[in-house]
Amino acid sequence: MFKKVKELLESGSISQEVANALNTEIQTELKSLRDESASWRVKYKELESTYNEVNSSKTNLEEQLKTLDAKIVKAKEDGKKELVTELEKERLEKDELVTKLNDLEATTKGLKLENAINTALNGYEVIDKDLISLSLKQSLEVKEDGVVFSDGKSLDDGIKSYFDEKPHLLKASGQGGSGNERQADGFAPDTLTAQMLGQLK
């Protein structure tokens, strides 16, 4: 049983039934968070794999296009019109594939960026996650080995600096005092657990 729930039970503030209900609620919330985290790890691995495959396919196709261009030049020099037509048709098809791969690369890049930002922001109590995510995207780049800031800082270091410079974007925390965003029991006020505990006081 969670420490705060146990304390409330022992002090007589809540009944065993309420304590069990709170304990179950908290356990369910934790399980949901763990499951979501595991699901994101699987999705991230799939995304990473897709991104690498797209990059590899694109590089391969670009090499094929260079070879085709050389063949087209040679066929033109040799006056082989039919071969030129055939090669140019093949080149057009490969060009269309490159365009599709570029679109797919942009999509996977965007998802990779989104996932990295969300994962990094999970360690902070932010006021508006979507707005901060949008702001951070302007300064981030997706590299082969991960997401970094344009100035070369790692994602974690860059985000720490970002919030050091803009602390007003974080929810207030601490014990007591006016304007405190966290209740004395340690739960954020907008969580179901905090609301349930609040009703018991």
Image (cartoon, grey):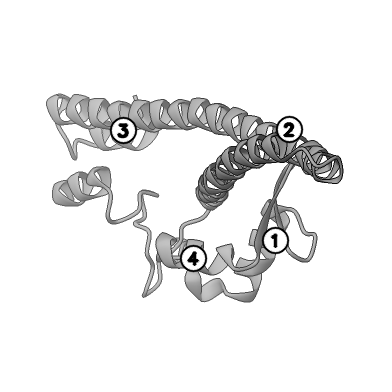
The residue carrying pointer 1 sits among few (fewer than 14), some (14 to 19) or many (20 or more) residues within 10 Å by Cα, namely some
Residue that mark 1 sits on? 158
Front one among 24 and 18: 24
Residue 121 image offset from top left, x and y in percent: 53, 53
Residue that mark 3 sits on? 29
Instruction: Kindly identify the residue that appears in the image at 64 percent across and 75 percent down.
Output: 165
Residue type, numbered disc 1: Gly
Which numbered tag is attached to residue 134? 4
Residue 91 image offset from top left, x and y in percent: 65, 40
Of pointers 1 and 3, the one earlier in the residue sequence: 3
Please identify, in this view, whether the residue under mark 1 or under mark 2 is nearer the observer.
2
Residue type, numbered disc 4: Leu
- Where is the N terminus found, in terms of image quarters? top left
Tag 2 secondary structure: helix
* Mark 4 → mark 2, Cα distance in angstroms: 33 Å
Which numbered tag is attached to residue 60? 2
Give yes or no for contact between labels 3 and 2 (Cβ–Cβ under 8 Å).
Answer: no
Residue 171 image offset from top left, x and y in percent: 44, 65
Instruction: Kindly identify the residue that appears in the image at 74 percent across and 64 percent down.
Output: 150
Please identify, in this view, whether the residue under mark 1 or under mark 3 is nearer the observer.
1
Is 63 placed left or right of 159 in the picture? right
Residue type, numbered disc 3: Glu
